[in-house]
Amino acid sequence: MLVVDHSPYEDEEIIAYGADLQISGHTHAGQFFPLRMIYDMLNYHAYGDYQIGNTNLLVSAGISGWGYPFRNEAHTSYDVIELRPAE
C-alpha cells in the first residue's frame, strides 16, 4: 500500500494500516536554524529516507519554503520516485 500524506506526523498510524511506503513533505527539512536540530533531538522525521517497521518513509525537503522566501538551514529538493511491481 502506498500512502501520500502532506506531513509525516502520523507515521505510527500508517504503520498500523500496513503501508509499504509513505511519501511526505511538510517539514521543508528544517528550513530555518535551529529547527533541524530540534527535529533531530525529538527524533522527528524531518527529511530523508526512514525504515519504520515494515514501512518505508520518504520525507522530501520540497522546492519552496514555508512562510518566508528563504532558507538558512536546509536545501530544496525535487524527488523523482519510480515505482515498480514486486517481483
Image (cartoon, rainbow, N blue to C red):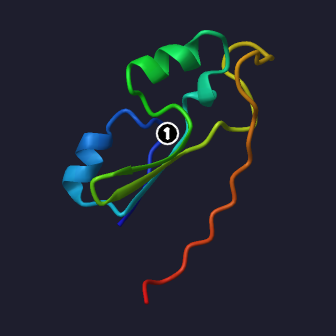
- Residue 18 x/y as whole percent: 24, 60
Q: Which structural element holds mark 1? A: loop
Q: Nearer the viewer, residue 33 or 5?
A: 33
Quarter of the rendering containing residue 59: top right
Q: Quadrant of the C terminus?
A: bottom left
Q: Quadrant of the N terminus?
A: bottom left
Q: Nearer the viewer, residue 21 or 74?
A: 74
- Residue 38 x/y as whole percent: 48, 14
At 39% from the left and 27% from the top, the residue drawn is 43
Horizontal side of residue 44 vs 71, given as left or right = left
Q: Residue furthest right?
A: 69
At 36% from the left and 63% from the top, the residue drawn is 20
At 19% from the left and 51% from the top, the residue drawn is 16
Q: Residue furthest left?
A: 16
- Residue 22 x/y as whole percent: 43, 53
Q: Nearer the viewer, residue 62 or 67?
A: 62
Horizontal side of residue 60 vs 49, given as left or right = right
From this view, report whether residue 34 is shown above or below residue 28: above
Residue with the mark numbered 1: 6
- Residue 74 x/y as whole percent: 71, 26
At 32% from the left and 37% from the top, the residue drawn is 10
